[in-house]
Amino acid sequence: MNQTVTRALDLLTALQDGAQSLDECAARLDVHKSTILRLLQTLEAQRFVTHDAQHRYRLGSRLFELAGAALAQRDVREVARPHLEALNERTGQTVHLAAYESGDVVYIDKLEARSGIRMYSRVGLRAPLHCTAVAKVLLADLPASVRREIAEGIDYAPFTERTIRNAADFLAELERVRADGFARDSGEHETFINCIAAPIRDGGGAVVAAASVSVPTLSLPAHEVLALLPQLMNATGGASADLGWAARPAAQREDAR
């Protein structure tokens, strides 16, 4: 029985490279055709494989269902945590994870900086939409009509002299975030904090969370915070990959929206 299960799994793995004939499957696994045919028939009965008019076998719809269920069961906080821990360890700075929930951007995880400087943010706290990097990343992924509706509903409280004050400027900022693939908060929320944020995507490409690195100006100037972007993108890219996202060129992502 174990050998049969192993062969069936090996067969499915072989088919991930594309459609194959019975002879090709048998040669790939170095197993007699009659054995491979029985396996294929059993797998096809359960929709794990299917075949075309030329009797070339390929992966079936049941696998897509299972893959979708597996990805849906993965919690973004749990998946992102090891990547954010590594980022926190490498940079020594405060790392946040935020999500968009029912009109609010909420911090869902936080790793403190290794220095003695602590930020007021905490898990469960809402982030202002118009002046935090994580909020910009999350809102930038929304459809244009939704972005405009949200932008027109913000009161634009001026936290600092750098805070965006109107919907037109905020929408322009979201367009920059979409083009750049990351967001900045350069003293817009707190005068003494600079922050960069990048998206975490699920298997379908939707932004499901934003991760950020926040640094007091006493620790690093703004240009040195921006220099941390490759490390941030590596962390968010790793978390996205674990959620099933296979990165595509920006033009292809736009075509798919």
Image (spheres, rainbow, N blue to C red):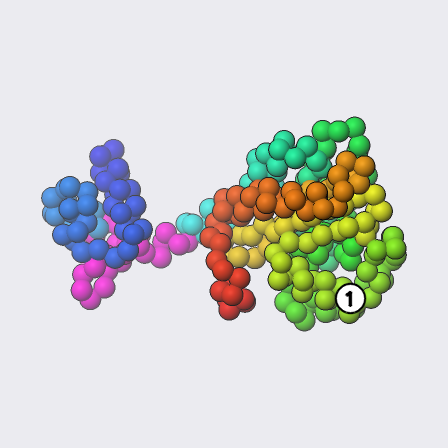
Question: How many other residues sit within 10 Å of disc 1, few (<14), some (14-19) or many (≥20)?
Answer: few
Of residues 246 and 34, the one drawn nearer to the viewer in this rendering: 246
The secondary element bearing badge 1 is classed as helix
Residue 127 x/y as whole percent: 77, 50
Identify which residue is drawn at 77% across, 50% down.
Answer: 186
The residue that appears at 63% across and 31% down in the rendered structure is 89
Reply yes or no: does residue 242 show up in magenta.
Answer: no
Q: Answer with left or right where residue 57 lies relative to residue 134.
A: left
- Residue 150 visible? The answer is no
**Relative image position of residue 253 (x, y in whole percent):** 52, 63
In the rendered view, would you say 125 is above or below 163? above
The residue that mark 1 highlights is 169
Q: What is the magenta range?
A: 41-65
Tell me if residue 144 can be seen: yes
Residue 56, by quadrant, is bottom left
Q: Please indicate whether residue 145 sits to the left or right of residue 68 in the image.
A: right
Which residue is at the front of the view, 89 or 112?
Answer: 89
Could you tell me which residue is drawn at 54 percent across and 47 percent down? 237
Residue 70, image x, y percentages: 46, 46
Q: Please give the count of numbered marks on the rendered protein.
A: 1
The percent coordinates of residue 184 (x first, y second) are: 71, 52
Q: Quadrant of the N terminus?
A: top left
Q: Quadrant of residue 58?
A: bottom left
Task: Give the amino acid type for the residue marked by disc 1 in the picture.
Answer: Asp
> Is residue 61 a member of the stretch shown in magenta?
yes
Q: Nearer the viewer, residue 128 or 249?
A: 249
